[in-house]
């Protein structure tokens, strides 16, 4: 099945472009998380400082995501992919001058995130035009495989790169990766959306009407609402983990995140990769809703397990327990992510995908904003472990609620 899409040269270009773009983003994210935590390590607000960093990425999505999605429905997605990657490559170089100033770091991250709001819906909306409907599950699993592979590479390489060549080297590597992604996107065919006649003034005037209409449609259409809610929860969990990861590494292993990323971050990434392959290959014929429900169950157990893991630190197998739980968290996220993304693409038409994925991006980041801030506050006031326990309880409660709603709406066979 993978061979059938990888022989599609346009898909291959888009896939490799995503690889370099996501690698750049993950290298940058990890480097900045480490840097911000270091800059605030001697204060009582280290986790909150990391929360503000994550919010600098998230807030532009809340403000601009739907508007960007509306523009994408009128634009050549190829041009959007090229321009956003070039812009991010240039902006990343700004960290070479301002990495020691937290305020300027947040502002640069904010600007980079604005361009990402255009990149995300353009990439998602372009994929169904490059492959046929039957290949969407495989294509999505490959894209998520790339997303998670870049996660593992970015988060695994950032620490050694910083230790060997310094933080500035990460910014150079990131800029080059964004530039390569832009060059690969240049090789794609025109990906003009079906809607014509872009009028920025009219779009700006009508965007709130569009937000209301798209949101209303999503809420009234369980086939769209369910995958969006699940993708939102997955994003929320990832953001919360990013916030507490530096403190969690110290709590669980007594070392910095850069030193123990192979015990905490690497297993999550491996779980993400293996999970995306399983869903795309071995489990591609299994009902997507069943995979989502099972993924939520695994996520609940993993979050709660990591939260109480410190109580078993005297065991000889302690490290293995943490690694397995982290792996389970990644596996669960992949099962939910691939399945939900596929359901969303199948149940949306080409002329509305930009709006729907833009709305998805907004909802994901809006829903994550408060939990991310609360996670940082809770981690500073109590402990990072308590954040994981609370998150596990909430995810489990939602899983039960979702199962009841799926049964009520007779969607368990989706």
Image (cartoon, helix red, strand yellow):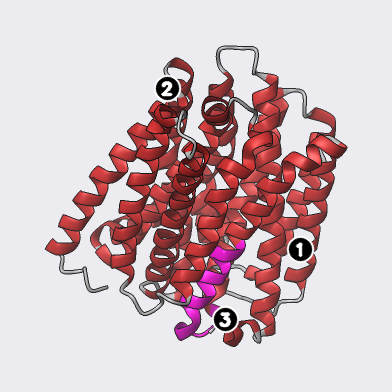
Question: Left or right: where does residue 146 sit relative to residue 203?
Answer: right
Tell me what residue is drawn at x 20 percent, y 50 percent: 400
Disc 3/disc 2 C-alpha distance (Å): 43 Å
Residue at the image point whose x is 59% and y is 59% from the top: 147
Q: Nearer the viewer, residue 232 or 250?
A: 250
Q: Which residue is mark 2?
A: 378
Q: Horizontally, is 404 left or right of 118 in the view?
A: left
On the rendered image, what quadrant is the C terminus found in? Answer: bottom left
What label sits on residue 2 in the rendered view? 3
Give the CA distance from mark 3 to mark 1.
24 Å
- Distance from disc 1 to disc 2, alpha carbons, whole Å, reads 40 Å
Residue 145: say if magenta. Answer: yes
Residue 362 can be seen, yes or no: no
Of the numbered discs 1 and 2, the one sitting upstream in the chain is: 1
Characterize the magenta stretch by its predominant secondary structure.
Answer: helix
Magenta segment? 129-146
Q: Which mark, residue 182?
A: 1
Residue 127 locus on image (x, y percent):
56, 73
- Where residue 216 appears, as percent x and y from the top left, is 29, 56
Identity of the residue furthest to the left in this view: 408
Q: Is residue 278 above or below residue 263?
A: below
Viewer-closest of 58 and 197: 58
Q: Residues within 10 Å of mark 3 (few under 14, many from 20)?
A: some
Residue 159 coordinates in the image, percent (x, y): 73, 39
The local secondary structure at tag 2 comes to helix
């Amino acid at each position: 099945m993978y061979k059938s899409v990888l022989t599609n040269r346009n898909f291959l270009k888009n896939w490799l472009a995503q690889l370099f773009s996501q690698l750049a983003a993950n290298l940058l994210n990890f480097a900045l998380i480490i840097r911000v935590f270091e800059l605030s390590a001697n204060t009582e607000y280290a986790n909150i400082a990391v929360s503000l960093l994550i919010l600098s990425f998230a807030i532009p999505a809340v403000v601009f995501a739907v508007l960007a999605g509306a523009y994408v429905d009128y634009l050549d997605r190829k041009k959007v992919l090229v321009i956003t990657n070039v812009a991010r490559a240039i902006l990343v170089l700004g960290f070479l001058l301002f990495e020691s100033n937290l305020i300027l770091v947040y502002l640069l991250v904010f600007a980079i995130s604005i361009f990402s709001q255009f990149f995300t819906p353009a990439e998602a909306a372009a994929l169904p035009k490059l492959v046929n409907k039957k290949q969407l599950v495989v294509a999505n699993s490959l894209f998520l495989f790339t997303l998670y592979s870049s996660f593992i590479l970015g988060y695994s390489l950032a620490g050694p790169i910083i230790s060997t060549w310094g933080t500035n080297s990460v910014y150079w590597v990131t800029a080059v990766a964004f530039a390569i992604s832009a060059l690969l996107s240049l090789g794609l065919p025109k990906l003009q959306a079906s809607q014509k006649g872009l009028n920025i003034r009219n779009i700006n005037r009508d965007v709130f009407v569009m937000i209301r209409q798209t949101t209303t449609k999503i809420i009234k259409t369980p086939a769209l609402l369910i995958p969006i809610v699940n993708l939102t929860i997955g994003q929320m969990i990832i953001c919360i983990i990013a916030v507490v990861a530096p403190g969690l590494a110290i709590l669980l292993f007594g070392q910095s995140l850069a030193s123990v990323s192979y015990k905490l971050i690497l297993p999550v990434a491996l779980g993400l990769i293996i999970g995306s392959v399983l869903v795309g290959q071995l489990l591609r014929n299994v009902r997507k809703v069943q995979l989502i429900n099972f993924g939520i169950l695994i996520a609940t157990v993993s979050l709660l397990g990591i939260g109480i893991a410190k109580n078993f630190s005297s065991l000889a197998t302690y490290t293995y327990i943490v690694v397995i739980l982290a792996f389970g968290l990644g596996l669960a996220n992949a099962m939910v992510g691939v399945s939900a993304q596929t359901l969303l693409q199948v149940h949306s038409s080409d002329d509305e995908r930009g709006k729907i994925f833009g709305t998805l991006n907004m909802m994901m980041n809006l829903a994550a904003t408060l939990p991310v801030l609360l996670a940082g506050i809770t981690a500073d006031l109590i402990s990072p472990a308590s954040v994981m326990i609370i998150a596990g309880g909430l995810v489990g409660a939602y899983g039960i609620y979702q199962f009841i709603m799926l049964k009520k709406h007779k969607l368990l066979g989706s």
